[in-house]
Amino acid sequence: MKKILTLLLILTIGLSSFAATQKKSKVISDEELAYMSITIDHITEKIYGGAFLSPKDTMALISVKIKLDDNMLVQPDKKYAPLYYKLGKIYQMRDNKDESIECYQAIIENFSDTALAPKAAAALKQMGINVKLPENINVEEE
């Protein structure tokens, strides 16, 4: 019985330290954030230029979105707001309404005190989405 309890204790400690390590490793570094921004800007340029997105571009968008969403669960940071806004614009230009709504809504819900919140609200309004906004947001027309 003692062996089983000891094994369970070791397993519990190991899992908790693994979870703590995983939590820390998910935080986006400034270098990775800069790279993500450059990636989004490059894809935006392609879209404005009328170029088709490659499967690699699509995977890059998905990767950026997943990293942002994962980090929002661990440690929301105002530095993510511009990336969410840019992603929302890309998804909107590509007629991916659900994804663009999700990006804009993330800004409104988590970064309502930033300059991008009114822009996100205006983008949603332009798409015909009725949004209940925090009181501190005045919707700007784009």
Image: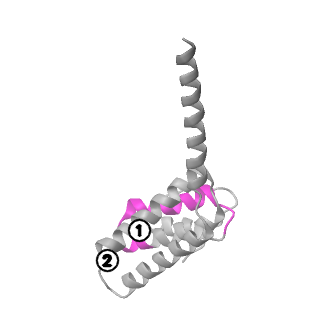
Mark 2, other Cα within 10 Å: few <14 / some 14–19 / many ≥20: few
Q: Is residue 101 magenta?
A: yes
Residue 79 in view here:
yes
Q: How many marks?
A: 2
x and y percentages locating residue 30 in the rendered image: 62, 70
Query: Measuring 46% from the left and 62% from the top, which residue is drawn there?
Result: 65
Visible in this render: residue 128? no
Please determine whether, in this image, residue 126 is positioned above or below residue 66. Answer: below
Seen in the picture, residue 48 relative to 115 is either above or below; the reply is: below
Q: Residue at x 54, y 77 (%)?
A: 142
Farthest-out residue, bottom: 49
Q: Position of residue 94 (x, y in %)?
A: 35, 72
Dominant secondary structure (helix, strand or loop) of the stretch shown in magenta: helix
Identify residue for label 1. Answer: 61
**Which of the marked residues, 1 or 2, is nearer the chain's N terminus?**
2
- Identify which residue is drawn at 54% across, 17% down: 3
Query: Circles 1 and 2: CB distance less than 8 Å?
Result: yes
Question: Which residue carries the number 2 mark?
Answer: 53
User: What segment is highlighted magenta in the picture?
Assistant: 90-114
Q: In the depicted view, which residue is nearer to us: 10 or 19?
A: 10
What type is the residue that disc 2 sits on? Leu
Identify which amino acid the numbered label 1 is placed on.
Leu
Q: How is the image coloured?
A: one colour
Task: Report crowding for label 1: few under 14, some 14 to 19, many 20 or more residues within 10 A (C-alpha).
Answer: some
Spatial CA distance of label 1 from label 2 is: 10 Å
